[in-house]
Each structure stands twice: as C-alpha cells, then as structure tokens.
Image (cartoon, rainbow, N blue to C red):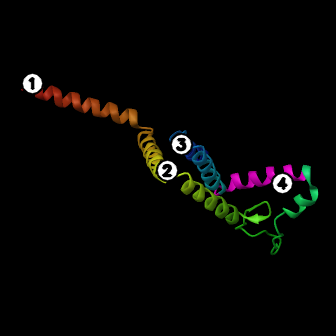
Amino acid sequence: MRKCRVSYRTNYFIMIIFILGLGFLRRPLAIVAAALTAVTIAFLNDSFAGTFNEKVTRTVRQLSPHLAAKMRPPLTPVIRGRPSAKRAIYICGRPRWVFVFIFSVVSLILWYVSCGLLTLSWGLAIGLLATILHATLRTPNLKARLNTFREEFRAVWRNYSEL
C-alpha cells in the first residue's frame, strides 16, 4: 500500500508540473523557472536527493577525482556501533537545505523577471484543483457508490410513477 501512495504522489507531482509547463509555452524563461521549481521540490524528496547526489558525484569522479573527493559529505560520528537514526542528506558535499535555498531563490528571481507570477498562480490553482478532483474521484468504491445511487434513484422514481 505504501508503494501505491508514493506512486500517486509522483503522478500528482508530474501532473502539476505538466500543467504549469503548458501555461508557459509562450515564455521560455518561465519554463526554465518552472523546471527549477520542480527540481527544488524534488530535492525535498529523500530518494531523489540521494540519487541526484550519487549521479553527480559519479559523473564528477570520471572528470576529476580530486573534485569528487571534495564533494564527499563530512563523516558522521558513530555512537556505540550504531549510526544516528536521523541522518542528514547531503548533495555534492553540502547539506540539502543549501541546494533547496539556492534553487528556490533562483526560481523566484526567474518568476519575477519573466512576469509569470500571475500565470504561475493560475497554473498552480488549476493543477491543485485537478489533483484534488482526481484524488476525490479515484475512490475504489466509486462504481459501487454510483450503482447504489442509481438503484435508489430508480426506487424513488418508481414510487413517484405509481402515484
């Protein structure tokens, strides 16, 4: 069940980003801002941040092993043979919040420069509305509820037609 929830969250994220992208087809700078915003939001996901860190480190290691060594996260102390339960996530040797902050500031500047703040707000509103509607109508018992409603309607209609 947990994997299913993660899958739906990913689908909702992709749907909102796609709707935002459609809203900015005429403004290329706003598309870049939307992409940076999407990456910023994705950095908040632990698995994405870890995978991104590994891919970037592996690529840098092929080009410059010395630079890749500098990109390692600092060593964390191990207490009594166990690593700490709450492990900080590092991207390119820096804490994750640094990347989230930098990417969000750059995307906000790009939103402002591209004059796309109104379009952004409309795109987010439509994307969130579509997500909420999909999540509401996605209930597993929707077909059963519709059949029950149809049967109740027929029963009431029969009672009225007999009068």
x and y percentages locating residue 29 in the rendered image: 60, 47
Magenta residue check for 162: no
The answer to whether the residues at label 2 and label 3 have Cβ atoms under 8 Å apart is no
In the image, the segment drawn in magenta is: 44-61
Among the 4 quarters of the image, the one containing residue 109: bottom right
Give the residue at mark 2.
120
Of labels 1 and 2, earlier in sequence is 2
Q: Which one is earlier in the sequence, the residue at label 2 or at label 3?
A: 3
Tell me the crowding category of disc 2: few under 14, some 14 to 19, or many 20 or more residues within 10 angstroms, Cα based: some
Tags 4 and 3 in contact by the CB under 8 Å rule? no
Task: Name the residue that disc number 1 marks.
Answer: 162
Q: Which amino acid type corresponds to the residue marked 1 in the rendered image?
A: Glu
Residue corresponding to mark 4: 57
Mark 3 neighbour class, 10 Å CA radius: few under 14, some 14 to 19, many 20 or more: many
Q: CA distance from mark 4 to mark 3?
A: 32 Å
Distance between the alpha carbons at the discs numbered 2 and 3: 8 Å
Q: The residue under label 2 is which amino acid type?
A: Leu
The residue at which mark 3 appears reads as 24
In the picture, which quadrant includes the C terminus? Answer: top left
Image quadrant occupied by the N terminus: top right
- Whether residues under marks 4 and 2 lie with C-beta atoms below 8 angstroms apart, the answer is no
Q: Amino acid at mark 4?
A: Thr
Element at badge 4?
Answer: helix
> In this view of the protein, which residue sits in the foreground, 101 or 87?
101
